[in-house]
Amino acid sequence: MSTSNASRWWTLLAVALGTFMLMLDISVASIALPQIHASLHASFAELQWVFDAYALTLAALLVTAGSFADRTGRRRVFLAGLVVFTGSSLACGLATTAVALNVSRGIQGAGAAILFAVGPALLGQAFHGKERATAFGVFGAVTGVAVASGPLIGGGLTSALSWRWIFFLNVPIGIVALFVTVLRVSESRDPRARNVDWAGAITFTVALAALVYALIRGNDVGWTSAELLGMYALSAAMLGAFLLIEARRGDQAMFPLSFFRNPTFIGISAVALVANGAGLPAIFLETNYVENLMHLSAFSAGVRFLPLTLSLFAFGAIAGMLTGRVPFRILMASSCIALGIGLLLTYQAHESSIWTALVPSMVVMGVGMGIFNPTRAALAIGVAEPERAGVASGINETFQQVGIAVGIAAIGAFFQNRVTASLLGAPELRQVAKDTLNEAARGISAGSVDAVAASSGGLRTTMLELGRHAFVVGFHDAMTACAICAFVAAGIAAVLLRTKDLHASALSLVPPEVDEREIAAPAQTALVVD
């Protein structure tokens, strides 16, 4: 279907509004966690679910949503995504319990998966030639602005109004996007679209949800408890079933396994998973540190994340200029190394530090994240022929969201474990019952150091000092774990990312000194389908 000149720019507006909301909600909640904790009396595990419920459904439904939209009608499904996302955002803002908030966040993630999957397809249908590059440039810029400005916007709304307004903000934006889509966006379908892989989507979702649940619950119920062993078994069984289903469905699968014959596709998928498993949990914990140990307001904390924001913006632009001039493996490995170094620089922050102790860490982390994002996006598309680039990119985005969900669960559990170990090992607290210290550790992990100390009676001063120390011990150990993940991602990038695996159509992304014949021939065999 042809699209008029005016209509296609309205399409860009609708997609940009939807993308801004869904990307903002990945980062905006971090700054409001202390207020959510206080308002809803949320535990540390429930605070983790504020992120994970959203990331889990976004990861699980991303590829399925795209396939469904291609067959059913992209405009129709995009409208459904806007309704789901806007309605669930309102439900998040109205939530009176942590459970209600996290259920609404899960539904919000489902709406986000639809918007994220269908938006680029609408742009691809509406724009052609040089205008398509402009449209996707705007799409990428909106994504970067939303993620980078999340702490500042979240801090401003939380301090001026309430944490609930970080979700209420989506309602008017969503309503405007709905009207624009209804009135101005044209419908489109793909007559050659794949069948929706519902069996793959269900088994993948259950496998991921069971794993994340087990990681978050581990500290509370015991890592070898019957409940968790059952969750591990369920996750493994569903993952095995998912792989069998995908193998039998061939190119109709949610994750066509033929893609994984390409070492570079495996590499960029693994790097996206591991690096995001390091980066987002680190921001989650840094926000906790800045607001709860330094006692900064939400807005003050958001302002102090500007070094990260500005560094991310600057080096994102630089990476865009370097893409096509510097080999992908160098860009990706360098970005992950910078991220790891930035994470280790958090060791400059201690119990009595002022906020500037984190500035070196934020700047270097911003360098890594800024280089990583545009390079990953370009490479995820470049490893497949044009007609399959959307599926390849969707799979890579899925790995990215899986990394966020599993990373926050695993690193968060490790952080709480280290806080608990520090308290249990303190000689001054030997006379305190173990159950009491475990409960105190859960409160300290959630940021309630002062409240835990205030409830400790005659040990108030001791618990305040040891609680702050335990928080920092857990923070440093968790940052070390994140740094190790970042360095592992750098190693994967250095070993598996190969220019010769790029498809011939991606030659414009390849450094000019590389022989084109080295790329085109292997690319024809790397993605052969049975």
Image: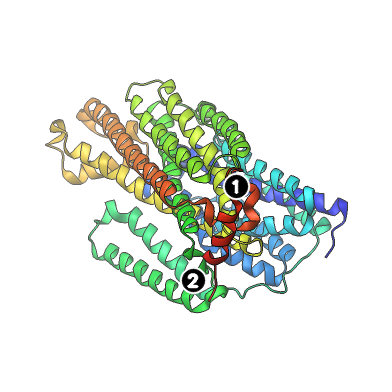
Q: The disc labelled 1 sits on which kind of residue?
A: Val
Question: Mark 2 and 1 residues: CB-CB less than 8 Å, in contact?
Answer: no
Depth-wise, is mark 2 or mark 1 nearer the camera?
A: 1
Q: Residue placed at 77% from the left, 56% from the top?
A: 181
Residue 510 bears which disc, if any?
Answer: 1
Q: Is residue 264 visible?
A: yes
For the N terminus, which image quadrant? bottom right
Q: The disc labelled 2 sits on which kind of residue?
A: Ile
Image location of residue 322, percent across then percent down: 59, 37
Q: Which one is in front, 171 or 128?
A: 128
In this picture, residue 240 sits left or right of residue 4: left
Q: Which one is in front, 438 or 354?
A: 354
Colour style of the rendered protein structure: rainbow
Q: Quadrant of residue 306?
A: top right
Q: Is residue 494 above or below residue 524?
A: above
Q: Is residue 364 above or below residue 16?
A: above
Q: Quadrant of residue 198?
A: bottom right
Q: Residue furthest bottom?
A: 248
